[in-house]
Amino acid sequence: MAGGYRALVRRRRDGHVVFDLDLVHAGVVAEALEQTRAVLDEGATAVAPPGPPAAPPITLPAGGPGTDDEFDAIVAALGMGPGEDDEAGEAELLRDDPVLRRLLPDAYLDDPEGSADFRRLSGGAVRGHKVEAIDSVLADLDLLRTQDGGVAVAPERAVAWLTALNDARLALGTLLALGEDDDLYAELDAYEQAVEDQVAAGGEESEALQGEAALRAYRIAVYDFLSALLDMVVRVLDR
Amino acid sequence: MHDVRGSQGTPEDPGAPASPGTGTGTALAERPVEQRPGVWTTMVWNDPVNLMSYVSYVFRTYFGYSKERAEELMMQVHTDGRSVVSSGSREKMETDVTAMHRYGLWATVQLED
């Protein structure tokens, strides 16, 4: 499957970059971008494996129903506490969410305080820039899906595709716990072979090939596609 | 601008008037004195995700490096695990690191070894 994609990105004579994805691929890219955006927006691991989120327990205070304390407790349990908690909340999210930490990394090694200062001053701009780029590409994809022959994007706007696609790859790479020497193609091939073998043997897909394994295989396939697409954008913009 | 931690300089007198002619900005001379001498650097670290073509493109586009220099730095990141891609004042390095983070590269600010 690697390297099997036809040229989906090309440069028009007037300099515009034409993205010509079919509906399935456009949908795959849009989904990956929306999930990355959700992580940036809420700091929640929206691209985490499906399943019910661990909701914080709502405990009612002893003061009885109808008190302000009760309201506060519910609001706090819903994660909508007062603004002054935002900073501590963000630090906690960063600690707990490897995807968010990769998208908004520490600027200083071995200096949490320096990194926190830096994040306070620059983190919002970095996050805003990433969200803006994702929204720009999502708008391009919306247009692409309503017309034939792809969507033509001005060069300045096409640059957003670079960071947006790369951020989606960073998010997926983090979720896949990608290592330097991991052979994702071999892993995906082995998974596909196992599914084929099972179907050929007339059996239903075993549990081992569903759930987490299927999700991982899907993420690898999406990651591979985003990598190929990003490489095409780089090469086209580079000329 | 955030103040420089680890400083042993005299704390600024909060009542002191702003230096003349600088408006609301803080003049360089008024900032706490950075005691540790040296040059600050922007270091880009290897990660298993970023594409070589992309990293090289970022170095050329943002820093204005030649194709050869950008490739050389990219290969250094790839093989040595890290590379110093710029150096200068701490503020400038924080600007560069912010830009690298926008591009999704893993970069840090540090004093030169």
Image (cartoon, helix red, strand yellow):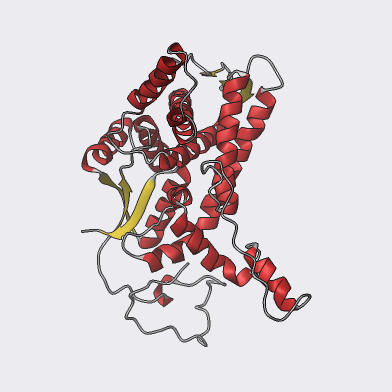
Tell me the residue at 46%/86% (across/down): B13
Q: Is residue A194 above or below residue A131?
A: above
Q: Position of residue B2 (x, y in %)?
A: 46, 69
Quadrant location of the C terminus of chain A in the rendered image? top left
Q: Is residue A126 placed above or below A29 in the rendered structure?
A: below
Q: Is residue A205 above or below residue A69?
A: above
Q: In the shown orientation, is residue A24 left or right of residue A123?
A: right
Give the residue displayed 68% in from the left and 67% down from the top.
Answer: A75
Q: Foreground: A166 or B69?
A: A166
Q: Quadrant of the N terminus of chain A?
A: top left
Residue at image x 22%, y 38%?
Answer: B79
Task: Say if residue A114 shows up in the picture.
Answer: yes
Q: Quadrant of residue A22?
A: top right
Extreme residue toward the right, this view: A66
Residue closer to the observer: A117 or A22: A22
A204, above or below A215, in the image: above
Quadrant for residue A238, please give it.
top left
Q: Is residue A156 left or right of residue B38?
A: right
Number of residue marks: 0
Give the image location of residue B6, x and y in percent.
33, 75
Which x, y percent locates residue A196? 43, 15
Q: Position of residue A179 (x, y in %)?
A: 31, 39
> Can see residue A16?
no
Which residue ends up furthest to the top in the rendered image? A200
Locate residue B35 relative to residue A230 in the image: left or right. left
